[in-house]
Amino acid sequence: FPAADTFTVETAGSERLRVTSTGGIHFNNAELIERVKITAGKLSDNQNINLDNGMIHHFTTAESTTATPNIVSSAGINTNMAIGDAISVTIVTTAAAAGYAATVNIDGQKISAGQGSLNWTGGSAPSDGGASGVDIYAYTLIKTADAKFTVIATQTKTS
């Protein structure tokens, strides 16, 4: 603890990680590795995206219909987050034109007028999936009030 309210980790005399008194995290030439929850199935059959298992979820079976991801955690996303907090979640599906996700739920509640807003980059929700490769859905959840979220969503099709 070289400074008041600061935590550092060093290897061979070089600082690798610092947590500041304001909650900032600094990495110095360090790798940031995150586990991916890999599901041998499709999103439409496994719609609960439990963030206790990580922030990236990959489904290995080709999607065949529409799906509505339900972003959850053991405590509940509303409980985990304070107003002004943001969480980024990535969902990777094995592409099929008939399979896509145009809506999203948080803690079982559809993100609509009463619970906040769902905003798709490009202005409109997806109406199909990719023809091959994977489809990638990136969601940024911003808690704006109790049980209210602004969600910014993007679908990227690969081949």
Image (tube, rainbow, N blue to C red):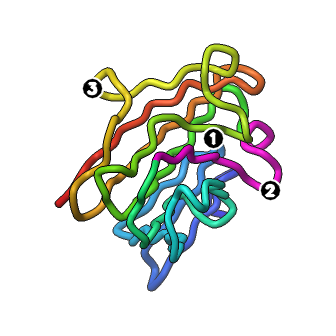
Which residue bears the numbered disc 3?
122
Answer with left or right where residue 2 lies relative to residue 154: right
- Secondary structure category for the residue under label 2: loop
Residue 39 located left or right of residue 155 = right
Crowdedness near tag 1: few (<14), some (14–19) or many (≥20) residues, C-alpha within 10 Å = few
Q: Nearer the viewer, mark 1 or mark 3?
A: 3
Mark identifier at residue 74: 2
Q: Is residue 63 magenta?
A: no
Alpha carbon distance from label 2 to label 1: 27 Å
Q: Say which label, 1 or 3, has the lower sequence index.
A: 1
Q: Which residue is mark 1?
A: 22
Question: Which amino acid is tagged 2?
Answer: Ser
**Magenta region:** 66-80
Label 3 crowd bin: few (<14), some (14–19), many (20+), radius 10 Å: few
Q: At which x and y percent is residue 131?
A: 21, 56
Residue contact between numbered discs 1 and 3, judged by CB atoms under 8 Å? no
Label 3's element? loop
Front of the two marks 3 and 2: 3
> Going by the image, does 92 lie left or right of 157?
right
Are the residues tagged 3 and 2 within 8 Å (C-beta)? Answer: no
